[in-house]
Image (cartoon, helix red, strand yellow):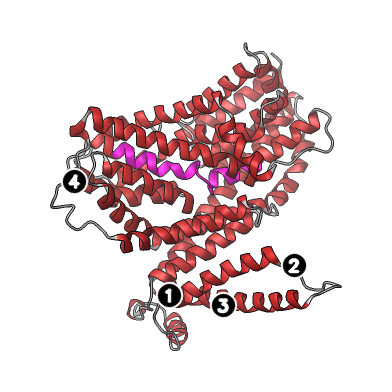
Amino acid sequence: MDVAAILDIAMFATACLFLLAGFPVAFTLAGTALIFAILGAMLGVFDLSFLRAFPSRIFGTMTNETLIAVPLFVFMGVMLERSRVAEELLENMSRLFGAMRGGLGISVTIVGALLAASTGIVGATVVTMGLLSLPTMLKRGYDPALATGSIAAAGTLGQIIPPSIVLVLLGDVMSSAYQNAQLSMGNFSPDALSVGDLFAGALLPGLMLVGLYITYQLMTALFRPASSPALSAADLEDRPGLGPILQALVPPVLLIIAVLGSILAGVATPTEAAAVGAIGATLLAGYRTTSIDLDAHDQAPAWRRGVIRTLAAGHRPGVWPPVIAALSILGLFVLNASFDLRLGLTEDTAAQSMARMAAFVLCALVAWGVFISLLRTLSNGCLGQVVRSTSEITSMVFVILIGAALFSLVFRGLGGDDTVHEFLNAMPGGVVGAMVIVMLVMFILGFFLDFIEITFVVVPVVAPVLLMMGVDPIWLGVMMAINLQTSFLTPPFGFALFYLRGVAPPEVKTTDIYRGALPFVAIQLLALVILSVFPEIATWLPEVVFG
């Protein structure tokens, strides 16, 4: 083994050790890369001119239109979490399914799937459901391990059910890897892989995972009835009617259809759909906050109190501004699908002119509804918290991305691509053996590293090699996404377990949380096996939708 290959292995191992020691991810990746770049230059196996490409990589990251979806989806998720969507869903679903054994666990899974498709933020989902449903499940006699495992697993569905932050980041990395693989094979007009392809590919596997979770809970209720009892007759006396259920269920479902449906229908790109989702979440928050609370700002600075009181002077409470704005967005979709609304056309019909004028009116109504919703969320302090959380999460993701870009640049400069290619090609079993090794390495790293670190460090290294071996890019991306999902549940550093431990009652032991998560980790591994045997589960929908 030559010096460059030894440095590659040592570089990867050093980065993992620093991460396990608790050093910040972005600075660990960038610092390790610089150390080994200088060391490689001193040993004559690394050309420092490779680092000249780093500024262009940063500029490319900042101008990447696909990655604009990250802050928009984060904003959408945090806004929905603050607008108490999960609370209403959990309350109504638990009373709806509570009559059957395991009903509370099933309701948690269903709500987790709905929140996954509307928020996609694991921490917010796990904390919300842990605060709301865990005390109820324990009070009704649920086994602590089953209760905590159900909540933690349901919270991680946001990583595989689109729209998902993981799929956005993974889609961007896989797109670059797919192009590099095709160029290396001599295809100088490479096919494109988009985030929308991964969204379509992950939808059916995500729903399959939800079905496996519910099946496990039903089997547990059948063979261990004491672990998941039904609600008592007294608890079921106030079962919700159709009205409250629809009021809690319809708004987030419509938002999911608007975001995911616009992508699958080809009406909008993932970034444009993320913008629709952010606007929709704002309107939903304004719909649930029908008035402006001026007393909440008595302690605020004078300028802020003055602005809010001035803006609120002409405001009238009610649900109609957000509702009218939401209907106007629907009208814009219909007009855009039916007419050419571009300005400056040489040939223009009367119908197109009228449609364009109607679109201007609808845009004005959307702006009015969004303004009212922003005013309401600003008055109750929600908007400030959402903007702050969005800025923190987005900054973390992009700083890690920049550090990972430097890491991968130095890794490639040391010949890491060739080392990985030779290693995977030497595996017995060909592409099957290589795929098993990659999945196993990602699963083991998930015990210690976050999904962002694995996505930005491991995937760019192994994905081009697997793609050159003939692996379908959509299937590979979905397999990696499900594998990354397990990192939230695997002890000792599973983030979903940490989130749940922080809000669980003192009588719930940490060992109960770990014990409850293990069956759901096994279910996720079973999903990987099913997907490997039947890859059409991931590849069929993208072929139907995008051809």
The disc, 3 or 4, on the residue closer to the chain's N-terminal end is 4
Depth-wise, is mark 2 or mark 1 nearer the camera?
2
Q: Which mark is residue 340?
A: 2
Tag 3 near tag 4, CB within 8 Å: no
Q: Amino acid at mark 1?
A: Arg
Q: Which mark is residue 231?
A: 4
Q: Pick whichever, 40 or 372, lies toward us.
A: 372
Which type of secondary structure does the marked residue at label 1 adopt? helix
Q: Amino acid at mark 4?
A: Leu
Which region is colored magenta?
148-173
Q: Position of residue 104 (x, y in %)?
A: 27, 44
Label 1 crowd bin: few (<14), some (14–19), many (20+), radius 10 Å: many
Tag 2 near tag 4, CB within 8 Å: no
Q: Pick whichever, 244 or 287, lies toward us.
A: 244
Depth-wise, is mark 3 or mark 2 nearer the camera?
2
Q: Which mark is residue 113?
A: none
For the residues labelled 2 and 4, the Cα–Cα distance comes to 55 Å
Q: Which residue is mark 3?
A: 365
Give me the residue at 73% from left, 75% from top. 351
Which type of secondary structure does the marked residue at label 3 adopt? helix
